[in-house]
Image (cartoon, rainbow, N blue to C red):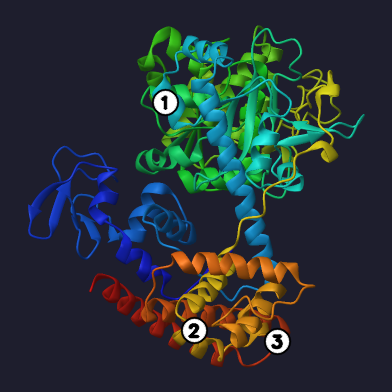
Amino acid sequence: MPRYADDAKEQVRDAVDFADLVGTKIELQRSGVNELKGLCPFHDERSPSFGINPVDKVYHCFGCGEGGDVYDFVMKTEGLDFVSTLEYLANRYGVTLEVQDEDPAAMERRRRRERLLDLLERTTQYYERYLWESKEAGPARAYLAERGLGEEVLRTYRVGYAPSAWDKVLLVTRRAGFTVDELQAAGLIARSQKTSKVYDRFRRRIVFPLCDLRGKVVGFGARKMAGDEKGGAKYLNSPESEIFHKGRILYGAHLARSAAAKDATVIVTEGYTDVIALHQAGLANAICIMGTSLTEEQVGELVRLAPRAILALDADNAGQEAMLRAARVAEGRKLELRVATLPPGRDPAELIQQDGAAAVTRLVEDSVPFVRFRLGRIISQGDVQDAEGKDRVIAQIRPILSAMPPSVLREDLARRVADRLHLSPSIAALLVVPDPSAPAEAVAPPAAGAAPAPAEGGHGLYGPPPAAVPQWEPEEPWAEDDEDGMEWGISEADLPPPPPPRMDREEKMERTFLTLCIARAADGRELLAKIDPEAHFTSPVMRRVAVHLRSHLAQPYEGLPEDDPDLTALIQQLIGQAGKASTTSASLQVEWLQLEMGRVDRAIAAARVAGEGNVGELAAERGRLRTELEDAMVRAVESDTG
């Protein structure tokens, strides 16, 4: 996790328009000179008791007592930690966060991750446009409309379409400057095992972007069109990679977190379209676990979203087994599990489409504690037509109820079981009393969702033991597309060369400084005399340019070596840019101080790696340079507007 500059918190806080930020959640009305009021986003109320001070950027609710500053508001409404909140606000209000104390290896990993995220974002935009603007995606638009999903909500979830051609994304992203290695690392292309040719991984499919909690696209889930016999597996996910881990993703969590925080509840479904349909129906706190297995990481994400999870999984046997596995994985976590029982054969999206939004809203409101669902399932699967069958069911139920602390819920569950089994009051009372003759493990609290232990010997008075609930295992990897027609793939040697790589921040800064030195030769000569090429510049050719300009600033073309075409080409570029530059002494000073800060940042990183003891001195120097830079920037603005 990056460590940002010490003043980053205040910089971001100063940039935030607090009224604008809060206004995205509730409607605000002016109530005084420095106060706006509205209905509290943290609890239900009919008259406003929630107020903000847009100048001091603080809030307080007199109804529920919630209060805090800009960061508290985002963390509570969006379900983010502090660093993610800082990044969220910086991105929203255009603040560039400076990373401090980062060793070179960590810096390289961060930059690579940023490029992969940029690549995935660009591809998402491409898929979105293809869905709404291409003729080929017409059947996909029709299918989504038939599912009852409107364009507005589909755009909210950024649903797209991957074209059928083998090379669309491959060529588009290559032209944008991304390498084959980056495309493969992002999971956007695959390589044929037969021919080693590369091709688009997603084709002829509706594409669902998979995002982290900040809304950054980290991968895709894709569904093939009905009737497509050559499309491979029905569903295809991005492969596991350095940036995408399926077991950590909850589909739609970045859009559900605000509603989940307000309702203290998250609705768990199995499918992408279930989430989208629920959101469209007004249940914006829905997420999808992308299959029927819930991982430890996903449970952790659920806990961060809300303290209560309602499982709205399919009513078939696979869906019920999934609920049992979910309970086992969630055991011991601060997560209350409830179950919304769906009609057989229908998922939430189908229920909404056929019976309306009110039908699924009622199911969610009528959800039951998980333990009640579990007991009902034991009874429904047991043979309760005779006394022996009832005894077997009681043997499974008693350890569950007797392990619960005395409560109204336990008594209610015992009564319901007794009614279902037609038990006498004396027998019903034994449901919550541990059987002293039973082995200790038979009355110990079982793992949530685990199968009860069979009676000793497995066969006896109670007959064969009930079938054990399967233990959770990661799902099989999503099937790859077939390679029919691989002759349409592309050999890497046949790919067009990518454009020159985009300059990073440091290279842009160094080029700008040298350009302005040429444009303002009198001031530039003085500053060039101060530079240490090895310390101030990050590339060999830029260092050679700086050394050349120190002695040839008035006539940069003079003395250029014939055996260094890179130096000559860069000098030509800088001279051309200098002729167009409009600059002042103050703006050149700004670039010099930024160059100095870059030198100190690299020195700090190197000192930390080497374990040297001068980090404190370097940090103090950086602080001084930062103050000088801020003053220089003010002077530069004044000189531009004066």
How many residues crowd around disc 3 within 10 Å: few (fewer than 14), some, or many (20 or more)?
few
- Using the image as rendered, state which of residue 549 and residue 245 is in the foreground: 549
Of callouts 2 and 3, which one flags the residue occurring earlier in the amino acid sequence?
2
Residue at x 58% of width, y 69% of height: 506
View extreme (left): residue: 32
Instruction: Please state the horizontal and vertical placement of residue 625, each as a whole percent of the image.
Output: 45, 85
Q: Residue type at mark 3: give it.
A: Gly
Residue 443 image-quadrant placement: top right
Q: Quadrant of the N terminus?
A: bottom right
The answer to whether 561 is drawn above or below residue 267 in the figure is: below
To which residue does mark 3 refer? 611
The circle drawn on residue 551 is: none
The circle drawn on residue 524 is: 2
The answer to whether 143 is drawn above or below residue 437 in the figure is: above
Q: CA distance from mark 2 to mark 1?
A: 55 Å
Of callouts 1 and 3, which one flags the residue occurring earlier in the amino acid sequence?
1
The answer to whether 144 is drawn above or below residue 333 in the figure is: above
To which residue does mark 1 refer? 153
Instruction: Please state the horizontal and vertical placement of residue 20, each as a whole percent of the image.
Output: 26, 50
Residue at x 51% of width, y 46% of height: 213
